[in-house]
Image (spheres, helix red, strand yellow):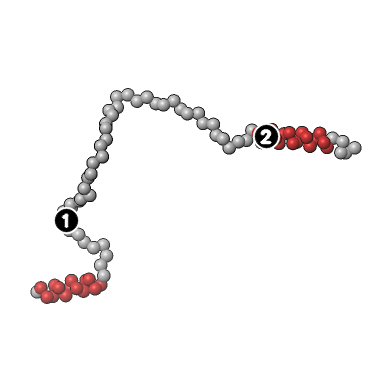
Amino acid sequence: MKHKHFGKLACLALSLMIAGLAGCSNEQHIEAAAPETVNNVPVVTVDKVMVPDWLEAVGTVRAAQTSPRALLRRHERRRRDR
């Protein structure tokens, strides 16, 4: 007698699982927004031109790091110049 309703319950459970999975999908429905209208904006035509990569700077260049040997050479040059 316990197994009398087993077939009906199994069919009901299977139907509910199929109905639940039918609602799940990987597709995302995104509604596109209406395009925005912009007024009083000038339109400019762009042309491709060659621009040289050249930079001139005025000032003193100093090393970020120095070695002990470089300091020794500078000291030796100062002694010679005296």
The local secondary structure at tag 2 comes to helix
Residue 76 in the image: state x and y as whole percent.
16, 75
Is 43 or 77 nearer to us in this picture?
A: 43
Residue 28 in the image: state x and y as whole percent.
55, 34
Q: For mark 1, does the 10 Å Cα neighbourhood hold few (<14), some (14 to 19), or many (20 or more) residues? A: few
Quadrant of the image containing the N terminus: top right
Between marks 1 and 2, how big is the CA–CA gap? 74 Å
Q: Is residue 73 left or right of residue 25?
A: left
| Amino acid type at mark 2 | Gly
The local secondary structure at tag 1 comes to loop
Residue drawn 27% across the image and 35% down it: 46
Pointer 1: what residue?
59
Residue 22 in the image: state x and y as whole percent.
65, 34
Q: Residue furthest right?
A: 1
Is 74 or 37 nearer to us in this picture?
A: 37
Pointer 2: what residue?
20
Residue drawn 84% across the image and 35% down it: 5
Q: Is residue 32 left or right of residue 21?
A: left
Quadrant location of residue 29?
top right
Marks 1 and 2, the one that precedes in the sequence? 2
Q: Is residue 14 left or right of residue 25?
A: right
Q: Is residue 2 left or right of residue 38?
A: right
Quadrant location of residue 73?
bottom left
Residue drawn 13% across the image and 72% down it: 78
Disc 1 to disc 2: CB gap under 8 Å = no
Residue 48 in the image: state x and y as whole percent.
26, 39
| Amino acid type at mark 1 | Gly
Is 8 or 58 nearer to us in this picture?
A: 8
Residue 11: mark in rendering? none
Quadrant location of residue 24?
top right
